[in-house]
Structures are given as C-alpha cells and as structure tokens.
Image: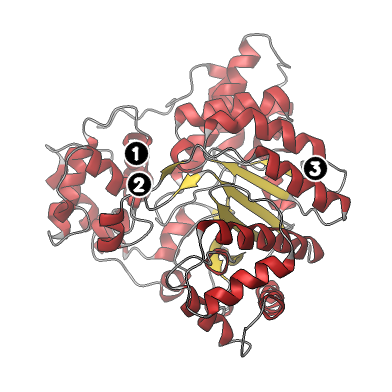
Amino acid sequence: MSYLKDNFLLKNKTAERLYFNFAKDMPIFDYHCHLPEKQILANEAFDNIYDIWLAGDHYKWRLMRNYGVDESYITGDKSRKEKFIAYCATLGTAFGNPLYHWSQLELKEFFNCEIEINAQNAELIWDWCNEYIALNKITPQKLIESANVSHIFTTNEIFDDLTTFTEIAKKDYKFKVIPAFRADKIMGVEAKAYKSYIGMLEAYTGGVNTIDDLENVIESRLQEFIKVGTTASDISVERVYPITEKPEANAVFVKAMKGEIPTDAEAEVFKGYLTYFLFKLYAKYGIATELHVGAMRNNNQVMFDKIGADTGHDSISDENSIKTMSRLFDRLNSENALPKTIVFNLNPKMNAEIMALIGCFQTSEAKGKMQYGPAWWFLDNKVGMERHLQDLTATGHLGAFVGMLTDSRSLLSYPRHHYFRRILCNYLGEMMENGEMTADENFVGKLVQDLSYNNAMKYLNMV
C-alpha cells in the first residue's frame, strides 16, 4: 500500500471539504499540452505500461539522469521492462520531487495500483499494470475519458496537418481536441532547418520569399486553425525581444532564405518584429495568447546532437525582459491590439515583476484579461504552486485565475490537475481556519470550481 491517503496534501478539515465537495469531481480542461493528436485519433490499445508511462516523458528521463542512470536505460537500447525497473528504482528515493507524487497518483488513478513505487516492487508493478492494460484494453480515449477531461488544447506548429482534428471530431469521444496555434519554428530564423520549415509552410500557399509573403501565409494558416476550433495561440521565447521594424526583419528573413545563418543579433531583430506581428494578428481574430518566457533550451550540445530537442536538457534562463515586455504590451495596447494574454514565467525571481506589469493592462474585455499563468515546467511542483498562489494573491486577483494545465506529452498527466486542486484547497482552507478570509464554504467552494475549470472555459471561449 502506498503512502497516499485521502487527505493527501490537505492539512485541515476545511481543506478536505473544499476538495471533496467542490474540486474533486470538476471536469478537466487541459488548455496547454503537447499530446500527439494522431495517437488520440488512432486510439490503439497499449501493450505495456512503459509505452504509456515513460516513452517520451522527458520529466522522468531527467530525474533518472540525476540519479546517475545510464542513458541506455532512458532513451537507449535497453528493453522496456529494464527501463521501467530503472525508473522505479530512481523514484524510490526521489522524496520531494513532484514525480514522486505524480507517478504514484498516476498508478492509482489509471491502473488501480496502490503498490508503493521502488526497486523492490518494480516487477510486481510491471506485472500488475500490464495485466490491467490487457484486461481493460486501455486506449488513449479510455485514459482521457476516465480522467474526466472535457477539452484538450494540443500545441501545433503553423504547418501541421489539421485533418487529424477534423477526423477526431467525427469520433464519439466524450472530449474535444483542438489545436492551439504556434509559430515558434517559423520564428526560429537562426535554426539550420529553417528553410525546410518554410518549405513545409509553402506547401499550403506557394512561394514565401519576403516578410510580406510570410505574414500573409501565417494569417491564412491561422484562419484554417480557427475553422477547426482554435481559440488560443502559443509563443515560447527565452525572453521578449525589442520591437523592430518590418524592413529590418525582412532583411534577416531574406538572408535566411538564401541558406545563410543569421547572427544572434539578427535573429533577435526578426523575433522582435514577428512577436509583435503575431500578437496583433491574434488580437485581430480574438485569439488568446499564451506567452511562455524563461526557458533556456538545448544546453547540452552532445545530447542534442544525439537525441534532439525536448529530451530533458532545458533549464531556467536568467534573462530579464520585463522592460521589453512592458514596451510590447504598451505599444499593442496603444494600437488597440493587445489580445487576452497568459504569461507563463519559468524564473520564479520574475514572479512579482510580471504580476505587477500585467496589472497595468487589465480591461473589462475579460475577467483577468492579462493572466499570470500557472506554475509551469520546473515550477509545477508543491513549492512552485504554493509560491505561485502567494504571489498571485498578493498583487493580483485569485478569482480571475484560469487555473492549471499539464504542459505534458504524457496521457497520464491529468492527476497534476488534482495535485494543483489539493494545493489550492489547502491554501484556502488554511486561510479560512486562520480567520484570514470568509468562512462561507459554499461561497469559497464556488471559487474553487471556477479555478478548477469554469474560468478557463470562459476565458478561452469554450462556453
């Protein structure tokens, strides 16, 4: 039997009542994730726990590397079972790491398995879960529906095939899968593969030779995304770059299309202009923008060359772009072109700066038009979520918050929503029992439901 109890993370009776009476049974809206939509459409039954639990999950890979596990047991040639056992052995002593909690929650929720995860129990868990998978014919649809998910926003590049979403919509799934629009690869003008990305874009439109051509095809692709239900976009940058002018950006784009690699300074010129253009475009079509800042990517060149991006070799950047973010928001606001925006910050040192800044651009256009996004990536742990709530309530308005997401490539990540809900209910429960806020549990319970689901649904135009 694992250490998980019904009152896990709930330190008082008020917190327990808030969670079980109001939060627990609310649906899940996963408004930012990286699930592969083609896998959801194919809906093929899984063969084993490794394929669901470990394949592609760089959170888990990173933890294993921290424990000194050889790469052959992570992304290498060891068998699925050997990799699974290595992860269980890693997790056994990872006290305080969110994966120590999440993984146990995942086994309990999806496989009815409450065996404590460690090296000693690894074989037993392997057999238990694989037998459960075979008996119940576990598919992506079953996993998502069992988690009470109503909507999923995948993150899709501008040139991705949208027919998959049309086909998913024809299925009898109890949930909707909708792409969020992303142009990050088109923004990454310094990438060696940049011309190939433009080539994939040209398949939809013909030649793209100038910045004007690029703007036109971006807008036409956004229109196609909107036809399949898109209401959100995503921009991910290490920092926000100064706004530059179109002729400067065009010169960098033309250079890249000649096969030349722009300098870092030139790349920033292009990204500064394109970020501004994208924000204006999203405002034009009423598309909410999820702005992710603070990730320093692909730090380990050896591993990048060996296994590529998004494999657990990114980290937190110390770049402070609060002034350029301010100038971006101010110019857009002055031009009546600032869309609803969720700012996801990866460096906790920037929490207060970002919270204070977004408060300068709120309007009645939406409750919490400018959002301080939930604790993300390296911060979506107990400490990070608690600090996020503290910073949010200290200088913002909790009632307007859009709540949690998974930001995950794993179909088993939905317990993260309940992890957040427990932390939220405990945060409010402690203030209630300390006499720091109203003791009206029904009133506070309605707020908990809004933060769990309702606010995000309204903010992203799903209701």
The answer to whether mark 1 and mark 2 are in CB contact below 8 A is yes
Quadrant showing the N terminus: top left
Asked where in the image residue 109 lies, by quadrant, the reply is top left
- The picture places residue 91, in percent across and down from the top left corner, at 24, 37
Left or right: where does residue 276 sit relative to residue 305? right
Task: Give, as a three-letter code, the residue at label 2.
Answer: Tyr
CA gap between label 1 and label 2 equals: 8 Å
- Report the number of numbered marks: 3
Q: Nearer the viewer, mark 2 or mark 3?
A: 2
Q: Which residue is mark 1?
A: 99
Q: Which mark is residue 308?
A: none
Q: Is residue 168 above or below residue 114?
A: below
Mark 3 vs 1, N-terminal side: 1
Task: Give, as a three-letter code, the residue at label 3.
Answer: Lys
Of residues 275 and 354, which is closer to you in this image? 275
Q: Which residue is mark 2?
A: 59
- Assess disc 2: are there few (<14), some (14-19) or many (≥20) residues with their C-alpha within 10 Å of its C-alpha: many
Residue positioned 51% across, 61% down in the render: 263
Instruction: Identify the secondary structure beneath mark 2.
Output: helix
- Assess disc 1: are there few (<14), some (14-19) or many (≥20) residues with their C-alpha within 10 Å of its C-alpha: some
Of residues 282 and 383, which is closer to you in this image? 282
- The picture places residue 38, in percent across and down from the top left corner, at 44, 73
Task: Give, as a three-letter code, the residue at label 1.
Answer: Leu
Left or right: where does residue 218 sit relative to residue 28? right
Asked where in the image residue 352 lies, by quadrant, the reply is top right
Left or right: where does residue 55 sit relative to residue 445? left
The answer to whether mark 3 and mark 1 are in CB contact below 8 A is no
Q: Which mark is residue 367?
A: 3
- The picture places residue 461, in percent across and down from the top left corner, at 74, 58
